[in-house]
Structures are given as C-alpha cells and as structure tokens.
C-alpha cells in the first residue's frame, strides 16, 4: 500500500499518529478521507472534522486524486496547508 500524504486535512483523532488525507476509490470513483496510519475512514471531510461515524476497510482499492479532482469536488478548502510545509 502506498503511503498517501498529498492532501492532508488534519491529524487523526483515533490514533493521534497518522494524517487524515483525501483519497479516491478507483473503481467508482468515490472520494473519502482516511488515516494513513490506522486506516480509519470517513465518508466526507466534515465527518472527520465533526467526529462523525467512521469505518475501516469499507472501500475497495484507492489512490490519491489529483489537484483538479480535489478542487472539482470542493474539498480543496479542507486541506491543512500548514501540514505541507
Ligand atoms: Zn489514525
């Protein structure tokens, strides 16, 4: 599994170790966020921010989206730019 870190939206509230990043389920495609350490998933960045229901291993193969995709789905604003410096 690749270690995704291109689009972080925050530090994981479950494991306190990983970054929660924007990823894309390849087959559909469907976007969600997940922790690159403990692999906890949230269906939407707001779900992570508001500590809503999470899942694990619910999604099929996924990869990192590109800038255009992140902008198109309106999730670019969730990226924590301070984590990328
Ligand atoms: Zn985690």
Image (cartoon, rainbow, N blue to C red):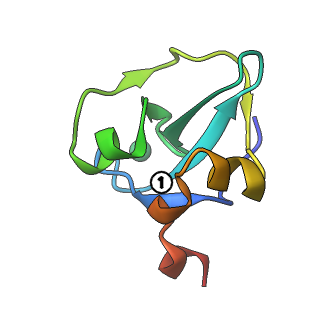
Residues packed near mark 1 inside 10 Å, few (<14), some (14 to 19) or many (20 plus): many
In which image quadrant can residue 43 be found?
A: top left
Q: Can residue 4 be seen in this view?
A: no
**Residue at point 21%, 46% (across, down):** 50
Image x and y of residue 39, in percent: 50, 34
In the displayed structure, would residue 19 be above or below residue 54? below
The response on whether ligand 1 sits within 8 Å of label 1 is: yes
- Residue that badge 1 annotates: 18
Q: Position of residue 62 (x, y in %)?
A: 71, 29
**The residue positioned farthest toward the bottom in the image shown:** 85
Q: Position of residue 20 (x, y in %)?
A: 48, 50
Q: Is 62 left or right of 46, judged from the image as shown?
A: right
At which x and y percent is residue 77?
A: 48, 64
Q: Name above or below for residue 33 compared with residue 43.
A: below
Residue in the foreground of this view, choosing between 81 and 19: 81
**Which residue corresponds to the image point at 42% horizontal and 56% vertical from the top-left?**
17
Q: Is residue 28 left or right of residue 73?
A: right
Image: 26 above or below 2: above
* Figure quadrant, ligand 1: top left
- Placement of the N terminus among the 4 image quadrants: top right
Q: Is residue 38 visible?
A: yes
Q: Quadrant of the C terminus?
A: bottom right
Give the camera-side residue of 66 and 56: 66
Q: What element carries label 1?
A: loop
User: Quadrant of the rendered structure where residue 61 is?
Assistant: top right
């Amino acid at each position: 599994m690749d270690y995704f870190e291109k689009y972080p939206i925050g530090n994981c509230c479950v494991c306190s170790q990983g970054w929660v990043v924007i990823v894309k389920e390849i087959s559909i495609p469907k976007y969600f966020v997940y922790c690159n350490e403990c692999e906890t998933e949230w269906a939407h960045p707001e779900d992570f921010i508001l500590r809503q229901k999470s899942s694990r291993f619910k999604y099929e193969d996924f990869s990192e989206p590109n800038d255009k995709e992140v902008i198109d789905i309106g999730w670019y604003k969730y990226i924590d730019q301070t984590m990328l410096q």
